[in-house]
Amino acid sequence: MEMTAPKINAKDIAYIGIFAALMAICSWISLPLPSGIPVTLQTFAVFLAAGALGGRRGTITVLVYLLLAAIGAPVLAGFSGGIGSFVTPSGGYLTGFLFTALLMWGLERLLGKRPWVLAVSMVLGLLVCYAFGTVWFMAVYAESQGAVGLMTVLGWCVFPYVIPDSVKIFLALLLSVQLRRHVK
């Protein structure tokens, strides 16, 4: 029995392009926190792409976005881009976006497209992104500045973002459920 991958049609390409552009726009939106740490809407866009478009198209969207960033398109926060963005201490969070989308796709394939599955996949996807990004941050930071403890890095890179990211998940879940009806 031969397995063939589903073909990508013109409508899929259009949706992927629109959502990749949305990811860029969301990365440029920076909301300051009282702590002085800005929050972008990148993770919101990752959740929305995988949630609204489904796992396959959402994952391709995230991959396209990251490839655009890698070749230097100014699609990242602060209108930045380039392969160097991936080797900074925070570059692991960018790569974590792909693992988030892949996890969301995997859970969708395994458990279906029900809203509770989407909610669980977004939360687990965020944890995967945090884990990948934190490990990367610790490795890159240690190489340039010296070793730093896990709790310190979590205090810098994760804890301040938990509440904003929870709000992003909630909003992405609401919008995804509504958009799925229209994005076939």
Image: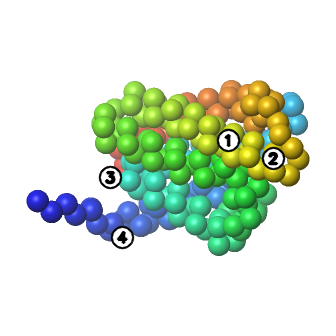
Tag of residue 141: 2
The residue labelled by disc 3 is: 184
Residue 142 in the image: x percent, y percent?
81, 45
Q: Kindly report the distance in space between the C-alpha atoms of the residues bearing marks 3 and 4.
A: 12 Å
Report the amino acid beneath label 2: Tyr
Picture residue at 85% right of the left edge, 52% below the top: 144
How many residues crowd around disc 2 within 10 Å: few (fewer than 14), some, or many (20 or more)? some
Q: Do the residues bearing badges 3 and 1 touch, measured as CB atoms within 8 Å?
A: no
Report the amino acid beneath label 3: Lys
How many residues crowd around disc 3 within 10 Å: few (fewer than 14), some, or many (20 or more)? few
Mark 2 vs mark 4, foreground winner is 2
- Residue closest to the far left: 1
Q: Kindly report the distance in space between the C-alpha atoms of the residues bearing marks 2 and 3.
A: 43 Å
Q: Earlier in the sequence, mark 2 or mark 3?
A: 2
Q: Earlier in the sequence, mark 2 or mark 4?
A: 4
Secondary structure at badge 2 equals helix
Report the amino acid beneath label 4: Ala
Q: Do the residues bearing badges 1 and 4 touch, measured as CB atoms within 8 Å?
A: no
Q: In which quadrant of the rendered image does the N terminus lie?
A: bottom left
Q: Kindly report the distance in space between the C-alpha atoms of the residues bearing marks 2 and 4.
A: 43 Å
Q: Earlier in the sequence, mark 3 or mark 1?
A: 1
Picture residue at 22% right of the left edge, 63% below the top: 4
Residue 44 is drawn in which quadrant? top right
Horizontally, residue 30 falls left or right of residue 165, namely: right
The residue labelled by disc 1 is: 135
Secondary structure at badge 1 equals helix
